Image (spheres, rainbow, N blue to C red):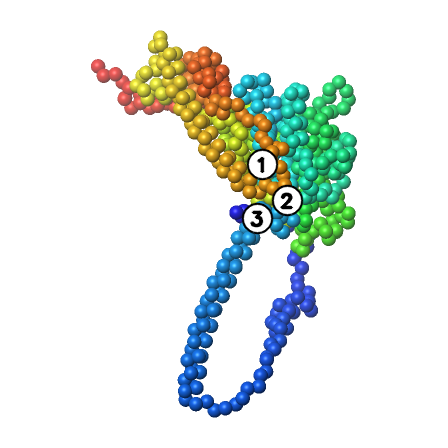
Amino acid sequence: PLHKLNKMPRGRRPRGAAARPPPVDGDSSDDNDNDVSAAAPPIRRLQQQQQQHLPSEDEEEEERDVGRNNNNNANDESMENNDDDYDDHNDDDEAEEEGGGGGGGGDESVLRILLSTDNHLGYLERDPIRGRDSFAALEEVLSLARHHKADMVLLSGDLFHENKPSRKTLHTTMEILRRYCMGGDPVGFQIISDQSQCLRSIVSGRANYEDEFYSVDLPIFTIHGNHDDPTRDGGPDLLSAVDLLSVSNLVNYFGRQDEVDNVKVSPILLQKGETKVALYGMGSMRDERLNRMWQGKKVKFLRPDQTQPGGDGDENNVDEYGESNWFNIFTLHQNRDLGRGSKNCVHESMIPEWMDLVVWGHEHECLIEPSESLVGTFRITQPGSSVATSLTAGESRRKHVGLLEIKGQQFRLKSVPLGSVRSFAVGDVNLGEKARENGGVLDVEDPKVEERMSDLLSAEVDALIQKARDDAEHLRQDAEEEAQRSRALEDEFDAPEKRQRKYQIKDPDRVLVRLKVEHTGFTTLNNQRFGAQFVGQVANPSDILLFHKRRQAESAKASKAGGASRKKRGAAGLDVPVE
């Protein structure tokens, strides 16, 4: 059962916003609430004529017995009624919790958006083992969107891995999008803003599902990333690989800024029932330039109050408290402030505080659970990549997509695990510590030190392989359980045989393994020669080991501390040799 939508704290009330209006004197609703007698219906009594007679002693005793029985029956009936009311109350609560899942009356204003980012289609497409991984992940993302009855899919950049993807990658991508996004079902939301100001649609000038020559029932909205950003290809026009999908009416491309010195982010205004969503997008830009423009106040966000008829005073754009009734989503593809320097990222304090949810792309670590921003007025979700493109610890985290449900000013984000992902395990080993633990088994002066190192590291890699396979088994079980739950939401008229999964990861038991080796004082091993013994067990046999040394600053600090310790011991006479 789906849980209730959790109300997230909104931002501070802007200056000049109207407070909650006081009750108007003489209001009929308030009078009725205060005057109970006015709302209560008159009691109608049924008058009956009865014959008056004096009862005998036997009749009086019989009436007393009947009265006691009636009182007992009345008490029993009142207890049964209370139990029935309690059961009805529980049923109402359960129905309210389940109100977002089966297409009932509560779905009319619930907008469902599937969140994904950094799909990197075409990554290692020539690899005989990992060549299908990116396409299998994309197909699973769209399949989950179908099963969970999502109204739309939001991609936050880097749909392609290469700036100029190959014809094979383009063909496979277009085939998957056409198979999952086209259909005859109606789209449950509408765009009420000027689409020419926010969508990059060259042919029709509007969203792909509104084109009369196409039948799209799962719209995809995407921005570009740093891998598929617009470039010039033998002409003055800047084109991205996403433009090819947009001109084919397979995706809705937005968030592109043609004026690099004056950025104006115009929202896509979506409406479903009583829910209104303002979707902002910003494609990838150079971090240093964007940071400088943001500091110079050259990045502007247009509010729905400014784009809608009536301006700030339009009563359709504000609620009873004088605040905007739009739910604001901002998706971007930039570096986060995670130790990259103050000028090479976008700081959370730069984002307008009136945003409700920020979907952050470009960062591959999956942090799908919404976290509170540093300014404390909006939430941030980071879906992460759907395929591992680097053998780092962040990529080894479990891959998820997010199912965002919005109703009015409330939202919830459900984490959905991906099953079509190659399992990945990362480990660390310090040769110096291992040498001390094993009682001098590893000795730098030993002529067979490389052989002993190889045996030690091979045992570590075997343990990582087993760990990755165990994680893969758990992941497959969780994915199967999620698929069984999602099948209950599948429309019986949506023929599943037309959208059967076509792309699967090849040899899932060949996992990804990366072992970081700190080898200060020791030599290194040939990676390809070492990985030859794991061919058929791992998908990356040529780059299993990553050798690194301790930082010079740490080494200098340790040597300095050791020198100071020796001086203290010498001053105390502890290091003086005994004659």
Horizontal and vertical percent for residue 181? 66, 34
Q: Is residue 229 visible?
A: no
Determine crowd level at label 2: few under 14, some 14-19, many 20+ residues with C-alpha closer than 10 A. Answer: many
Tell me how far mark 2 sits from mark 1, CA to CA.
Answer: 16 Å
Q: Is residue 401 visible?
A: yes
Q: Which mark is residue 5?
A: 3
Work out whether 456 lies above or below 487.
above
At label 3, the amino acid type is Leu
Horizontal and vertical percent for residue 578? 23, 16
At label 1, the amino acid type is Leu
Badge nearest the viewer, 2 or 1: 1
Tell me how far mark 3 sits from mark 2, CA to CA.
Answer: 12 Å
Describe the element under mark 3 as helix, strand or loop.
Answer: loop
Q: Which residue is mark 1?
A: 144
At label 2, the amino acid type is Leu
Tell me how far mark 1 sits from mark 3, CA to CA.
Answer: 21 Å
Pointer 2 with pointer 1, Cβ within 8 A: no
Work out whether 326 lies above or below 139.
below
Q: Which residue is mark 2?
A: 111
Foreground of the two, 94 or 554? 94
- The residue positioned 73% from the left and 19% from the top of the image is 233
